[in-house]
Amino acid sequence: MFSQIFILSPRGDTIINRDFRSDLPKSTPETFFRQAKTYSGDANPLFNVDCIQFAHIKRGGLYIVGTSRFNLQPAMSLELLDRLAKEIKDFCGVINEEVLRKNFILIYEILDESFDFGYPQLMATEQIKPLIVNEPIQPQPDSVMNSLRPKIQTFNIFVPNTMGSQAVQRSVLNKNQANEIFVDIYEKLNVLFNSSAYVINQSIEGCIQMTSFLQGNPPLKLALNEDLQIGRQQGQYSAGVILDDCNFHECVNANELDMNKTLRIQPPDGQFVVMNYRISGDYAAPFRLFPIIEEISSSKIEVTIKLKACFDAKIIASYANIRIPIPKQTANAYPELVKNAQQETAEYDSNKKIIEWQIKKLCGGQERSLKIKLTLQATQTAHTARKEIGPIAMNFEIPMFNVSRLQIKYLRIEERGNTTNPHRWVRYITQSSSYVCRI
Amino acid sequence: MAYFGNNQQRGELQELYADLNDLNFEKKKEAIKKVIAYMTVGKDVSQLFQSVIKCLEFQDIEMKKLIYLYIVNYSRQKPDDAIMVIQNFRKDVRKSENPLVRALAIRTFGCLRVPKLNEYLIEPLKDCVQDDDPYVRKTAVLCVPKVFEVSPELCPALLEQLQKLLEKESNALVLANLIQSMREIEVVNGKQLIVLNPKIIQKLLLAIDECMEWGQIFILDYLATYDPVDSKQAEIIIERTLPRLSHINPTVTFCAVKLILKYLDYLNNGDLVKNLCKKISPSLISLLSWNQPEIQYTILRNISLILQKFPILFENEVKVFFCSFNEPYYIKYEKLDIMVRICDSKNFHQVLNELMIYINEADPHFVRKTIKSIGKIAVMYDKALAEAVSILVEFAKNVQQTNEAVQELFIQMQIIYRKNRNLYKTNDSLKILFSIIDYANEPEAKSACAWIIGEFAEFIPKSVEKMGEYVDNFILEDRLVQLQILTSGVKLYIKYPSLCSALIQQLINSAKDSFNPDVRDRTYIYWRLLSTDPEIVKNLICYVAVGSSQFQKDIRLWETKDLITALENMGSISNLFHKLPNQLYKNIKVRNNNQQEVKIYKADEKQEVPSKEQEIKKDDQIQQQQQQPKQDFDLLNFEEPVSNNNNNNNNNNNNNNNNNNNNNNNNNNKIDVYDLI
């Protein structure tokens, strides 16, 4: 199991260093940092130097690293580090260098309860809460350090980078907090169209996530659609919502799911994923793209792209960005928006040979279009160049909308001891994961 | 500078020393926090050992935690001072009412790792293993391997105690820790410690439901090493494991998959096996679309292993492995690899259609791998040949400049031509390839081009001129290319003796003094042969391969024996590197397998029950009959071609020579030997 767990600052300074087994040299953090710096971008999550296994994740610009000399399960090491980061976040509210430096004793406590001899022990926030004696120290919100520090953003396509929620950035140890619970339903869409807007492949990866600040952690009952069905038989068509597969958090009792579509939940503190699900069946894609390519002459191509939002007019997509790769041999490209276009921009990046079309807000039912005029270099003809156009990739987010029609019918708090009725917030978010149109 | 630095540090230490000895409790506590802070950044504060441990007399638990942290860090530097702490520990363990304090003491105690302190530890540890509080018990149980590692001679009594505990323990958390610590001692000790009987298994199965996810991993992982006694027992264990397939922790799910896959071998009910496979497959696919790419990657690396034994799992699921545009490349590469593995005579059309799209990707390395995959499919499935070649030809038509992908194109086309010599008749691939032949610049690609020119000289309009160019630059070429130019040059000479006589002279002249013995020897062999009887040379060199038996559909990643070991270590880091654990870690011993055969689970349309057919061993036998056991054409070698890697070439030459052997010409043996050097 883990020999050491250490947390390094972006500059390689040790913030936390806990040695469980004393079987590795003290200089291991330096070895790690030196190796991690040899990668041009982000370092591989797993690597091996002199028979030492390093597993690391990056959170808030910090390296959270586990080392080992054993034949570990890599999926487990990464999951453990991720859980540790979640715990720290639950206790401290946020993860950054300043907070960790201020709370290092608390972190040592958390580490000691979470791991013994490198083996994971108690790794759920509410389980170790009674064993922790330190209080988190919140950083000064307007300290000079905070404003000076550059915003470190790690590029991760899977992290939901969505609108701010008041549910985050709060410590579970904060006693004077509102009695409330947040339920998010995220859906990530994978769609692949061919040039005639016919769907080749599509799937949804969804999850129901909760952030609980309920006092006393009362049991919950969460009801989903009545026409929900789990497991897909081949060749079966049903009007209901069919999940191909799903999995549940430990605190969820899914015994009644088949019968009356309810989940019984014993919510832990802080953030947790109630359920992940996967849908591979047909669904109505929220956006359709219609690309048209015309060869004007042997050196000129005109590309017209129509975008149609195929959802209810009351729903507004918060953004939609479209990237169109164009031929390498392009001499010049002019993206032209429709006249009077509002909240739209289209730019040509001549280095990457990409047209970026950004739409700020898009109501359901609306149509937008973009015309791109390409001039090619003399070395290539339009006929061969047109093959290099595309595939068109789209990024978007649609709040309060989900494609699968999976719904929360109700969320009931089973034992309501005190008189105040806790606030229950539900939101739906649909995002693109890989939304691509081939030409 | 050094003077000031030292002085400053001493100043700090003295300040801390004063604070630690202060009467004010809060001040002491602050001082200890500072000490820990220094310790974390790596400053040596061991001189304060005495003053710090004096503070242990307070019963404040926060203070205790801090001091223990300090002691663990410095006990090995100051073993004599550490002895003074022992009394405190024993008091905490024996007298404290608070289980937290007891557990904290025993946990810290175990981390001291000073041999001479351990004898004081044994008695309190024994008490703790039998403590009433499960929190203390779970900590104590994990403490045993810590002590065992440092002083195993003290432990026999403790180990017995653990074995007893295994039978009567009822708390799931303790049980999970118990299994894990006993396993670790087994590894260090080399003796079996855990004796499973039906009762204990029953208990472990119950514990899986109760304990936390990490405990579940420990227990499932352990059960996966167990061999069930009969089909009934395997069935029971599988049944209890099934709910874990829908766990939110990917490792739990994967451990459950591992366990079930292993136990399938023990089931004698074919329908049940089939049903189980249907249940496992969606869980694995969910793991594949996990929201962390790292997890996806680890699963993908294991899938190629699972596929070797359980092709049934991903039948009809090839779409799952299609790449999304936003995935990291390391995932795309793995998916390509797997797509080739599960491609069969039914779904090749679907796979090729998808691969055709990837050819237009921006990253040349990815395109290269795609072309390699297409080449492999073309060689493996005759039905797919025409379609695959047309994709490659279409790609060749659009080549504008030289890049990695073009190099791979030549290499793959060469392999395809070798297998299907008549291909040149059916389409204009030769002409198109020849028009871009100047783009070949990697040794392997160049040697492929040289082969193509020699082999199809009659059908390429300017083959002699091109070969002339190659011969002119002979000295500058890589060894691999030189060898191929030699063979192709001789082929050309045989085909056009009058046109090429000057060319062959020039070739032999520049090659006969080569510093490379391979090149030199081959030159002399050809020279002698040509000067004795060109007719023999013609039979030899220009022999047209008939049939394609050399191209085995071998997509095995592992040898049978290693497959079993690898499956046992499914999900571990060694499998991530596609290595055996003992190859990666010197200290790990691998259980010897006498098992010779592996059941392959395949879906068969005629028989409803998945038949356990096609033992890999049979393949081996066939190979041996052909007397070329080590000549598997490495169809799935996705490694980057190394410029000096003559593996491929040697194999190809072997194929050539074997054909020659079939010709039953005595002289051939000579060349056989020389080619192989």
Image (cartoon, rainbow, N blue to C red):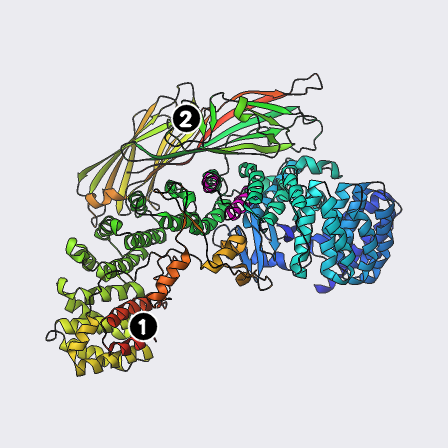
Read off the magenta span.
B253-277
Residue at the disc numbered 1:
B479
Checking the image for residue A361, the label placed there is 2
Indicate whether A39 appears above or below A88: below
Judging depth in this view, the residue of A305 and B19 nearest the camera is: A305
Q: Amino acid at mark 1?
A: Arg
Q: Is residue B197 visible?
A: yes
Q: Position of residue B134 (x, y in %)?
A: 75, 41
Q: Is residue A169 visible?
A: no
Q: Position of residue A370 (x, y in %)?
A: 30, 31
Q: How dense is the environment of label 1, judged by Cα within 10 Å: few (below 14), some, or many (20 and up)? A: many
Q: Amino acid at mark 2?
A: Lys
User: Magenta stretch mostly in which secondary structure?
Assistant: helix
The part of the image, by quadrant, that contains residue A404 is top left
Q: Position of residue A89 (x, y in %)?
A: 63, 38
Mark 1, mark 2: which one is toward the viewer?
1
Q: Residue at x 28, y 82 (%)?
A: B513
